[in-house]
Amino acid sequence: MNKIKQEVINSVDGRKYPPNVEDDLNSKANALFSEGIGKKFLQYLEGITTNNVHGPGLGIESLAHYEGQRYIVGIIKARTEMGKKIPDQSIERRVE
């Protein structure tokens, strides 16, 4: 059998995706979070995660929980920024 090896690229989330899947995820993040209500909501998420400082004495379980939240918000922000660089951002594609 002759299997065609599909090109994959390393993603911001640590996984590997074909370029079309990566572009789709990034364009969707951009459509959702780059302006308007989505942008304001992302700012809110940053405020309660990335910009939140926890004092000493925080248990390891809580610390791991908060770092996981920061990681997810970081992925959303990175994908939103990468989505801005995708040329075809027509409204039809953004709504899919």
Image: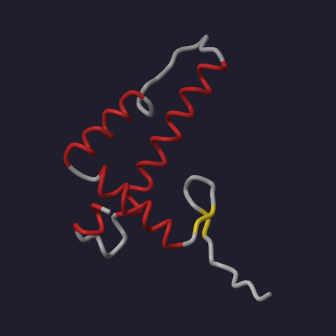
* Residue furthest left in the image: 36
Residue located at (29% from left, 57% from top):
31
* Residue furthest bottom in the image: 2
Residue 45: x percent and y percent?
A: 37, 34
**Quadrant in the picture for residue 42:** top left
Way the structure is coloured: secondary structure
On screen, residue 43 above or below 64: below
Residue 70: x percent and y percent?
A: 50, 36
If the image is split into quadrants, where does the C terminus sit? bottom left
Residue 85: x percent and y percent?
A: 36, 69
On screen, residue 44 above or below 2: above
Q: How many marks?
A: 0
If the image is split into quadrants, where does the N terminus sit? bottom right
The reply, left or right, for residue 21 in relation to residue 94 is: right
* Residue furthest top in the image: 57
Residue located at (44% from left, 30% from top):
49
Residue 15: x percent and y percent?
A: 63, 57
On screen, residue 27 above or below 37: below
* Residue furthest front in the image: 1
Q: Nearer the viewer, residue 71 or 88?
A: 88
